[in-house]
């Protein structure tokens, strides 16, 4: 008997892909705003951090690539925390 692979792509995963695309577009819009207004840097860092965290979560859900997931989570947390701390005024 052949071993059947479980299909990892379902409606919820496709919904998560749509959310990731929307977050990437928001990050791109914030980057374009940053080019004209340098005060947007902290918001850009936070948006990129959240997008990277979501990318890591989605990659772990679909592809199971552990090194890429860990890298996305580490950079996402660092960028997100630095963005939040910069917005609050700690850094």
Image (cartoon, rainbow, N blue to C red):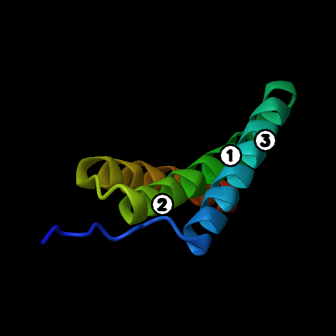
SS at badge 2: helix
User: Which residue matches tag 2?
Assistant: 58
Query: Can residue 89 be seen in the rendering of this structure?
Result: no
Q: Residues within 10 Å of mark 1 (few under 14, many from 20)?
A: some
Residue 7's spot in the image, x, y percent?
A: 40, 67
Q: Pointer 3: what residue?
A: 30
**Closer to us: 68 or 33:** 68
| Residue that appears at 69% across and 58% down | 18
On the image, the x and y values in percent for residue 12 come to 59, 74
CA gap between label 3 and label 1 equals 10 Å
Label 3: few (<14), some or many (≥20) within 10 Å?
Answer: some
Q: State which mark lies toward you, 3 or 2.
A: 2
For image coordinates 35% across by 55% down, the residue present is 63
Observer-side mark, 3 or 1, equals: 1
Q: Which image quarter: residue 84?
A: bottom right
Residue 55 vs 30, above or below: the answer is below
Q: Can residue 30 be seen in this view?
A: yes
Q: Counting residues from the N terminus, which is met first, the one under dot 3 or under dot 1?
A: 1
Q: Which mark is residue 24?
A: 1
């Amino acid at each position: 008997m052949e071993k059947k692979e479980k299909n990892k792509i379902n409606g919820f995963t496709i919904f998560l892909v749509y959310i990731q695309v929307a977050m990437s577009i928001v990050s791109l819009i914030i980057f374009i705003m940053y080019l004209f207004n340098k005060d947007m840097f902290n918001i850009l860092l936070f948006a990129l951090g959240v997008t990277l965290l979501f990318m890591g979560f989605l990659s772990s859900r679909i592809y199971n690539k552990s090194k890429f997931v860990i890298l996305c989570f580490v950079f996402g947390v660092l960028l997100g925390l630095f963005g939040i701390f910069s917005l609050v005024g700690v850094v």
